[in-house]
Image (cartoon, grey):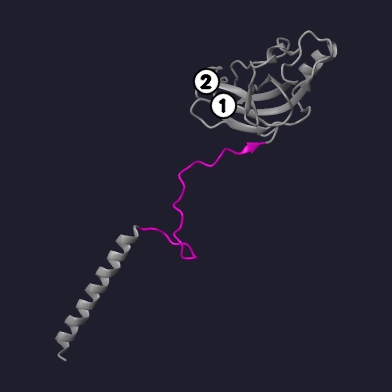
Amino acid sequence: MDRSLEGIFVLRRLVVLCAAVTTLSACSGGTTTSAAGEPGAAPSSAAAPAQVLKLGEPATIRGEGGQPLTVTPTGVYFYRGRTGDALRPAERWWAAVSIRVEATKAADRLPPGATGEWQVRQGSRTFTTVGGNAGNAPWVGRVGEGVEQVAPGDPQVAVKTFDIPKGGGELRWVTQGEPPVRWSMPGRTTGSGLDDVKAVMRVG
């Protein structure tokens, strides 16, 4: 066969092969294939659930003015009340949680209740600092419960009180439009930062 004709035939075969490969790629839609020959899953765009921190582990949140604040729950104190007390928990236990708040860059404060709040989550139930008889715990009004302006190098401690049926669950900081920051809630009195609460309870 003439070499020029042979070259033409080879060129035609290459053109046909390239067209077949292009068609196959377009039909597949770019789907990846796993090692077992099954279509691979597309990368998920969903955000991974927030990690549940332990008591004493810090987290960074946004303050009312947009500055970063480091918040660290450091202790929990449980109190059930005494028989004959005029006011007792509506659920079963009062729980005081000490929270250390630090400014890392500029002075700021925790957002007000309308945009951020502390919660305890147990199963399908959510408890807040204004639920049940939380506001009637013996130490409420006698210890530092809120945090005003926090300056760098001058951390403050806030005590948040809940009326809950049992220990355990999750302590949460919840703000609008953001996933909650979560800590594992201990099932018994533990940790630090609650000396003022304990002093009130000793005095009665």
State whether residue 81 is above or below residue 75. above
Q: Is residue 33 left or right of residue 126?
A: left
Q: Is residue 107 visible?
A: no
Q: Residue at x 52, y 20 (%)?
A: 115
- Which quarter of the rendered picture does the C terminus lie within? top right
* Numbered range of the magenta stretch: 30-53
First in sequence: mark 2 vs mark 1:
2
Q: Is residue 183 visible?
A: yes
* Residue found farthest to the bottom: 1
How many other residues sit within 10 Å of disc 2, few (<14), some (14-19) or many (≥20)? few
Separation of marks 2 and 1 at Cα, in angstroms: 8 Å
In the picture of the structure, the residue carrying the numbered disc 2 is: 115
- Which quadrant of the view contains residue 29? bottom left
Rendering coords of residue 199 (x, y %): 81, 15
In the picture of the structure, the residue carrying the numbered disc 1 is: 174
State whether residue 136 is above or below residue 98. above
Rendering coords of residue 11 (x, y %): 20, 78
Q: Is residue 107 left or right of residue 15?
A: right
- Which quarter of the rendered picture does the N terminus lie within? bottom left
Q: Nearer the viewer, residue 69 or 91?
A: 91
State whether residue 34 is above or below residue 129. below
- Which quadrant of the view contains residue 10? bottom left
Disc tally is 2
Q: Residue at x 60, y 19 (%)?
A: 150
